[in-house]
Amino acid sequence: MSFVGLFLSGAVLFLNSLMLLGKAEAKSVGVFNIFVGIIQIIIPSCLMIVSGQNNWELYNVASIFLFGLTYLYVGVTVLKGLDGSGLGWFSLWVAIIAVVYTLTSIIHFHDVVNALTWGMWALLWFLFFLSNALKKKIDTYIGIVAFVQSWVTLTIPALLYFLGVWNTRFVSQIWTLVLILAIVYFVVSLFKMKFSYKKESSGQEIEVI
């Protein structure tokens, strides 16, 4: 996906994380989702028309649609007050596609940073599936994951690219470590939250995932 798209996606995911954490009003965030979603449908459509229709060109353009459609779906779901089950099952489909992008990044392109990034996005989409389709009460955890990912997989990489340092060996090594630490943080946060829920329920385990 283009780095301008990453930059805009960082803003959307940042706001979505605050919405999930109860820090931002849902309908106002939904409007921004639709705004960016429309942009990320129009831009890849134009790129697809002018491209040489090479399979890897289409592969890159298709990834932008995944984000654009997700933002539109989230925005409409929030503004219309829908139950979210359709969004949840769509998120599962996208999560599976994201796993394919993860494997392609490491096997074909030998790009560890991109593979870790797509893997983290696959996790986030899967969490949206659990929340919206299976009705798991994990909004706080999703909010934490989304907040971190909005910075380490989207906003900061885009800014580093704009500054001309993203494709350097040093930054690649540092960012591999940053992404691995973020994944460790997600795992630790999950276990801490499950332990906290168990304590609050006086010994009765509450299903989180």
Image: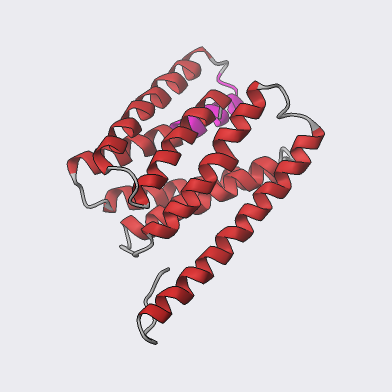
Q: Quadrant of residue 207?
A: bottom left
Quadrant in which the C terminus is drawn:
bottom left
User: In this view of the protein, can residue 80 be seen by the observer?
Assistant: yes
Helix, strand or loop for the magenta stretch, by majority? helix
Relative vertical location of residue 15 with respect to residue 91 in this rendering, above or below: above
Residue placed furthest toward the front: 23
Residue placed furthest toward the top: 50
Give 174 or 80, whichever is nearer the viewer.
174
Say if the magenta span includes residue 12: no
Q: Quadrant of residue 136?
A: bottom left
Query: Residue visible at 70% across and 42% down?
Result: 175
Say if the magenta span includes residue 59: yes
Q: How many marks?
A: 0
Q: Quadrant of residue 113?
A: top right
Residue 115 picture location, percent across and down: 65, 45
Query: Residue visible at 40% across and 75% down?
Result: 197
Quadrant in which the N terminus is drawn:
top right
Residue placed furthest toward the bottom: 203
User: In this view of the protein, can residue 99 be seen by the observer?
Assistant: no
Residue 152 picture location, percent across and down: 59, 42
Query: Residue visible at 40% across and 58% down?
Result: 140
Give 52 or 157, whichever is nearer the viewer.
157
Give 53 or 94, whichever is nearer the viewer.
94
* Magenta highlight range: 53-65
Give 121 or 51, whichever is nearer the viewer.
121
Residue 3 picture location, percent across and down: 57, 26
Residue 49 picture location, percent across and down: 47, 15
